[in-house]
Amino acid sequence: MREIKFRFWDKDDRRMIAGIPVYGEFTRYKDSKHRRFWDTAAAFRYPDEFIPMQYTGLKDKNGVEIYEGDLLKKEGRKKEVTIFEVVFHEAGFTAKNTDSPSAVPASPAYARAFERLEVIGNIHETRNY
């Protein structure tokens, strides 16, 4: 069974808050800049402030965890580059080609395909993808 965890895009501070499990010990995170206290449950209660992105259970070719909203790069044999965006679609994660309507399901059955891709950023922090 895959680990259920999220990372959150903080809309106000324009930064990613990662590695937060949804179950287990109750943990408070402190933002030293604003002295604001919050926790995982608070992030879900304030959708105007935080955008949750779920872990897919897959890793890229460098062992980096792949989350919803990540941008993945695939290099072809002739060095052509294809960029995919990880989205939640029809009850599952999909890697959607950013230049065409093609997509690859992001499920354990396709894990080997994702091991050939590389996380190059995400839709919130990466410009001009």
Image (tube, grey):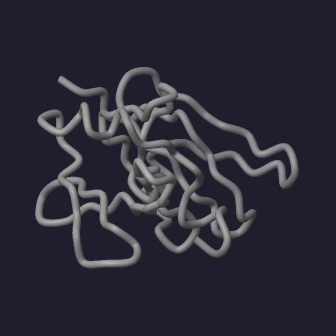
Q: Residue at point 30% right, 27% down? A: 3
Q: Residue at point 85% right, 43% down? A: 32
Q: In which image quadrant can residue 85 be found? A: bottom left
Q: Quadrant of the N terminus?
A: top left
Q: Is residue 35 left or right of residue 44?
A: right
The image shows a total of numbered marks equal to 0
Of all residues, the one furthest to the right in this rendering is 33
Q: Position of residue 76 (x, y in %)?
A: 41, 51
Q: Position of residue 80 (x, y in %)?
A: 48, 60
> Of residues 95 and 9, which is closer to you in this image?
95
Q: In which image quadrant can residue 25 be found? A: top left
Q: Is residue 25 left or right of residue 34?
A: left
Q: Is residue 10 left or right of residue 97?
A: right
Q: Quadrant of the C terminus?
A: bottom right
Say above or below: 68 vs 109: below
Q: Position of residue 24 (x, y in %)?
A: 38, 22
Q: Residue at point 75% right, 63% down? A: 13
Say above or below: 65 vs 24: below
> Of residues 89 and 83, which is closer to you in this image?
83
Q: Position of residue 96 (x, y in %)?
A: 30, 66
Of all residues, the one furthest to the front in this rendering is 78
